[in-house]
Image (tube, rainbow, N blue to C red):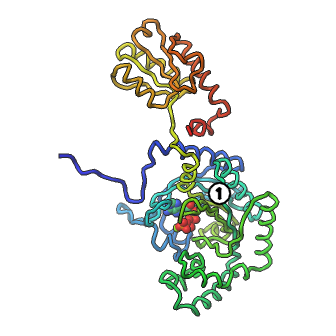
Amino acid sequence: MTSPKIVAVRGMNDLLPAQAPLWEAFEAEAVRVLRSYGYAQIRTPILEPTALFRRGLGEVTDIVEREMYSFVDALNGEALTMRPENTAGVVRAAIEHSLLYEGPCRLWYMGPMFRHERPQRGRYRQFYQAGAEALGLAGPDVDAEQILLLRRLWQALGLQDVRLELNSLGQPPERARHRADLIRYLEQHHERLDEDARRRLHSNPLRILDTKNPALQELVEAAPRLLDYLGEASLDHFERLQQLLRSAGVGFAVNPRLVRGLDYYNLTVFEWVTDRLGAQGTVCGGGRYDGLMELLGGKPAPACGFSIGMDRVVDLMRDNAGAAARADCEVYVLHQAGATFELALRAAERLRDAGLSVILHAGEASLKSQMKRADASGAAYAVIVGEREAAETAAAVKALRAADAVAEFAQQQTIALDLLAPSLAKLLRGERAGHAGLPSTAEGRLKQ
Ligand code: ATP
Ligand code: MG
């Protein structure tokens, strides 16, 4: 009798090797672009005190009300939550370690986030975000710069049809005035509101403007607009941001109903959206959160950040890449066990010393069936250490793919072991010209 299978938690996906090259390509490009704007990495824990999110995100947000994986640690009674986002964690860490002591800092992070949502395409319970936070900078220059950074990233990833939507949420007093009028307006139309809107009417009415319910569109379209409540300073900030974007040639649309889900935003908010992913079309959200440092117990400091939904971006990249991308090894080493295996092991190590990726055949099999494996591995070259080759401390080399059949090894050819690694490294490096260096390795290996 076989034991029953254990499967993954719903909404939490395995990322299988076939998908890994796209993730690696995203990660490599993102790190490269973030660094080129002076952002440094920060890694914070996945578990944080529940109070961090309750206070940081706001009690009446979707996340805190019903999406958090929260539990009491049975060992010591601490109330903990698996991070649903990472701005609060980064700000907590910045305060805890006085990162702003010497001036503003630019930080980036990447990793898994957890929200108990209804799983569907582009919406998972464990998902991945890459984000950046500029702490101690009041903008709008840095707001514009983050948008340029993101435009550069989309370009580097070959994503064309993501567009930018922009809004300003003003400052808390402006929002309070707008909120009072908005509630009054919505109350006048109470009978037309859906259940969700009624629930939010007095807790988070701004979010009602964001509703996807078609029946409410006309109502929210005619609702008081937050933009009309902004004072001069807020309008100046917003106008200057738009000017900077225009002069940098960034296209955008002002969307007065763009509100974002979390309490901590003020002034600038933005989203990058695409029509290619169905309902979950937002690939990145960001904005300013000048009040969060103080709210979490730090010295007041302005800040601006964004977060990219990596699952959705990788989905777009997959569309672009067409056929599955694969992380191929470069060389497959065959042998006939015994002493030939020892020599093959030595050859494989030398190839790796030369920077190549190598699969050394494991176990015993005929050379013919090993050759099939070599072909299927996607490697560019097979290196065969048979008994005949071993007797001469040599190996046979054969190019496996037509395109790689550089004159030298189009036909199988024997080569002294000492010359093997330098020759193959030269051939393979030639092929990868322009992809030298660590960050672009993943991209260099993407087979379209
Ligand atoms: P949505 O309106 O789609 O729920 P959100 O406002 O909750 O998004 P943010 O908290 O701003 O999302 O997170 C930033 C980005 O992270 C989103 O734009 C999206 O790309 C991604 N994201 C958020 N929640 C999920 C999820 N459950 N699964 C996959 N990606 C997600
Ligand atoms: Mg959400």
As drawn, the residue found furthest toward the top would be 392
Q: Describe residue 416's horizontal placement relative to residue 295 as left or right.
A: left
Q: Is residue 398 above or below residue 182?
A: above
Image quarter of residue 377: top left
Name the residue: 60% across, 39% down: 443
Give the total of numbered labels: 1
Task: Say which residue label 1 marks.
Answer: 161
As drawn, the residue found furthest toward the bottom would be 188
Would you say the beta carbon of the disc 1 residue lies within 8 angstroms of ligand 1?
no
How far from the left and from the top, in percent, is residue 319?
55, 51
Name the residue: 71% across, 70% down: 254
- Report whether residue 405 is seen: yes
Query: Dot 1, crowdedness within 10 Å: few (<14), some or many (≥20)?
Result: few
How far from the left and from the top, in percent, is residue 440?
62, 38
How far from the left and from the top, in percent, is residue 129?
55, 56
Image quarter of residue 267: bottom right
How far from the left and from the top, in percent, is residue 352?
52, 25
Name the residue: 72% across, 50% down: 37
Query: Helix or strand or loop: what does disc 1 sit on?
Result: loop
